[in-house]
Image (tube, rainbow, N blue to C red):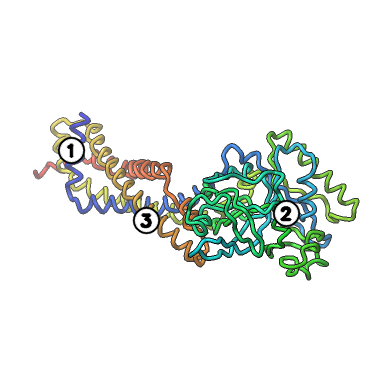
């Protein structure tokens, strides 16, 4: 019976092919727009570092001046001062690993001919950074813990391609500003579409290299201007980024990201208690004038609180759902038109003894096939929509984004492909129930009276 219904369904699809194609296109366009928006949100909501995201904690403390405005959202809390980062890093805690990092912007240059210097964005950090954030190496490895002040550097695959033509550059010399550094490792491309390790959660340009924090300070590499300072320090902010390094290191300016790896919830609570005791101790030195407010959250908690994708993404999703609903309403009308045009044939079959459920099965099978074809078209249109959105994002950023990183944020994975086809089939069946019910309940007498 299934083969017979399948044969009739295929024959019915070829009947009024223009209307069938229009229905498939309507479903495909609706699915394409819906899955484009849903996929963007799906990729943005993926928590990186599975298996570690509940163990990697960002540490933030309210060391601002007493007159600063209250902060309730963790993502708006300031980073750490340099002295607090060093104190926590050197303290004995329950954390299995700790690291901190800050941005510097030196010029990188190789001795290779036909290569241009790079105005680089570099993370100054510790040796433990690479293991904590699961960095993958193509060549070499990270520097040792004892080399946090050594003139060494880890470069990315993109930087290695630019400076050394992609070959194994471990052991080569790179000019960093006016100093020299030895390449000890080359990183593979990141598998996450956002920079989580610097708390920017940005999909824009990734870092070009990583160097030991003490080496970055020793060569006085230019630092980022993104720092929050107490009023008495604010006037020196420009000098802090370029020349007045001792002033910056002893100031109350916050500019250092700090991470701790804590292996269990009990240890996490103990670490929070340690951080609170640290603030109490610093208050005794006249620091931390505000009430104690520490935010020590793992990556999972940060994602949940920040609601990545945000209100803008939710509004786009709502528009996509509404557009898809309109497409389904149009599909109902077209199905009614197509099915009711075969009412005489259906009534004749019923008059000859065909049961309603047999006829209903045939038309539902046809509806499923229309949904399947619409889903396939929707997958193609989703791919095109994501490609378009990716290029729009690149254009809007004035081409500052890395295309390889954007490819991760706008990729159509198999989960979304399956969802596209599944949603298309299910929604088409749902909206097709009424047209199918109408056609099988047409009275044979009303259609065959004049036949």
Q: Position of residue 331 (x, y in %)?
A: 31, 50
Residue 318 visible in the picture: no
- Circle nearer the N terminus (3, 2): 2
Disc 3 target residue: 384
Between 257 and 67, the one lying in front of the other is 257
Between 237 and 294, the one lying in front of the other is 237
Q: Position of residue 54 (x, y in %)?
A: 64, 39
Label 3 SS = helix
Mark 1 or 3: the one toward you: 3
Q: Residue at position x 57%, y 42% from top? A: 49
- Circle nearer the N terminus (1, 2): 1
Q: On the image, which quarter does residue 226 sit in?
A: bottom right
- Circle nearer the N terminus (1, 3): 1
Q: Which mark is residue 214?
A: 2
Q: Is residue 285 left or right of residue 221?
A: right
Q: On the image, which quarter does residue 207 sit in?
A: bottom right
Q: Is residue 307 left or right of residue 366?
A: right
Q: Is residue 243 left or right of residue 131?
A: right
Q: CA distance from mark 1 to mark 3?
A: 34 Å
Q: Residue at position x 52%, y 55% from top? A: 160
Disc 1 target residue: 8
Q: Is there CB contact under 8 Å for labels 1 and 2?
A: no
Residue 375 visible in the picture: yes
Label 2 SS = helix
Q: Residue at position x 18%, y 45% from top? A: 342
Q: On the image, which quarter does residue 109 sit in?
A: bottom right
Density class for disc 2 (Cα within 10 Å; few <14, some 14-19, many ≥20) is some
Q: CA distance from mark 1 to mark 2?
A: 76 Å
Q: Is residue 345 left or right of residue 32?
A: left
């Amino acid at each position: 019976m299934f083969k017979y219904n399948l044969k009739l369904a295929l024959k019915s699809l070829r009947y009024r092919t223009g209307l069938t194609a229009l229905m498939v296109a309507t479903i495909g366009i609706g699915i394409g727009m819906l899955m484009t928006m849903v996929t963007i949100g799906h990729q943005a909501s993926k928590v990186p570092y599975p298996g570690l995201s509940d163990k990697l904690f960002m540490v933030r403390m309210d060391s601002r001046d007493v007159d600063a405005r209250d902060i309730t959202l963790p993502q708006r809390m300031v980073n750490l001062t340099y002295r607090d980062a060093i104190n926590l890093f050197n303290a004995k805690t329950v954390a299995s690993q700790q690291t901190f990092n800050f941005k510097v912007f030196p010029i990188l240059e190789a001795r290779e001919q036909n290569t241009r210097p790079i105005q680089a964005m570099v993370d100054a950090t510790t040796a433990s950074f690479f293991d904590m954030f699961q960095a993958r190496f193509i060549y070499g490895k990270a520097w040792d813990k004892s080399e946090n002040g050594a003139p060494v550097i880890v470069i990315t695959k993109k930087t290695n391609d630019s400076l050394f033509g992609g070959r194994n550059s471990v052991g080569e010399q790179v000019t960093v500003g006016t100093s020299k550094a030895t390449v000890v490792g080359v990183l593979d491309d990141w598998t996450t579409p956002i920079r989580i390790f610097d708390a920017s959660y940005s999909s824009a340009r990734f870092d070009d290299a990583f160097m030991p924090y003490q080496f970055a300070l020793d060569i006085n590499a230019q630092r980022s201007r993104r720092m929050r300072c107490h009023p008495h320090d604010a006037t020196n902010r420009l000098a802090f980024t370029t020349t007045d390094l001792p002033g910056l290191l002893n100031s109350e300016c916050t500019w250092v990201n700090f991470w701790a790896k804590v292996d269990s919830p009990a240890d996490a609570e103990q670490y929070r208690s340690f951080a609170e005791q640290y603030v109490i101790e610093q208050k005794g030195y006249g620091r931390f004038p505000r009430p104690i407010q520490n935010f020590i959250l793992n990556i999972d908690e940060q994602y949940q609180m920040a609601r990545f994708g945000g209100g803008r993404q939710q509004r786009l999703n709502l528009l996509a759902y509404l557009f898809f609903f309109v497409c389904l309403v149009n599909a109902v009308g077209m199905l009614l038109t197509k099915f009711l045009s075969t009412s005489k044939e259906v009534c004749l079959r019923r008059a000859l003894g065909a049961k309603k459920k047999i006829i209903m099965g045939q038309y539902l099978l046809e509806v499923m096939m229309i949904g399947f074809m619409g889903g396939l078209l929707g997958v193609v249109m989703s791919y095109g929509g994501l490609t378009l959105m990716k290029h729009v994002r690149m254009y809007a950023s004035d081409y500052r984004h890395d295309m390889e990183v954007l490819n991760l944020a706008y990729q159509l994975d198999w989960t979304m492909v399956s969802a596209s086809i599944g949603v298309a089939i299910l929604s088409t069946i749902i909206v097709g129930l009424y047209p199918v019910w109408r056609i099988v309940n047409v009275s044979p007498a009303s259609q065959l009276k004049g036949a």
